[in-house]
Amino acid sequence: MERAGAEMVFCRRWDERRLSYKLKGRKRGLYVLVYFKGPSEKIGGLERDCQISENILRVLVLRAEGVTLEMM
C-alpha cells in the first residue's frame, strides 16, 4: 500500500470459508475487506504486488465512491 501511495482507511476480517475448489493447494480461504484511498493510476501496481505475494491468493479492487466511514 505504501508503494502505491495509498492510505488504509478501514480493514477487517470478513470471513473464513471453504473454497469451492483448491486454489494453490489451499482448501480454505480468509476473506479480508479493506477500504483505502489512493491515486487511481497506481491501482495496477497495487494489484500486481498482490498477485506476486505468496500470502494473497486472489484480489479484487473496486471503486467505492460516496462510502462514508459509518457505512464501512
Image (spheres, rainbow, N blue to C red):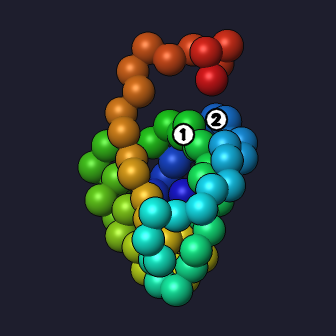
Residue for point 38% across, 62% down: 47
Dot 2 falls on a residue whose secondary structure is strand
Amino acid type, residue under disc 1 in the picture: Phe
Q: Are marks 2 and 1 in contact (CB under 8 Å)?
A: yes
Q: Pointer 2: residues within 10 angstroms few (<14), some, or many (20+)?
A: few
- Residue 54: x, y in percent? 54, 82
The residue depicted at 36 percent of the width and 70 percent of the height is 48
**Residue 23, position as x, y percentages in the image:** 46, 77
Looking at this view, is 22 or 66 the one in front?
Answer: 22
Give whichever of 56, 1 is nearer the camera: 56
Is residue 39 shown to the viewer in this render?
Answer: no
Residue lying at 55% horizontally and 57% vertically, measured from the top left: 1
Residue 8, located in which quarter of the rendered image?
A: top right
As drawn, 2 above or below 65: below
Mark sitting on residue 36: 1
Residue at numbered disc 2: 9
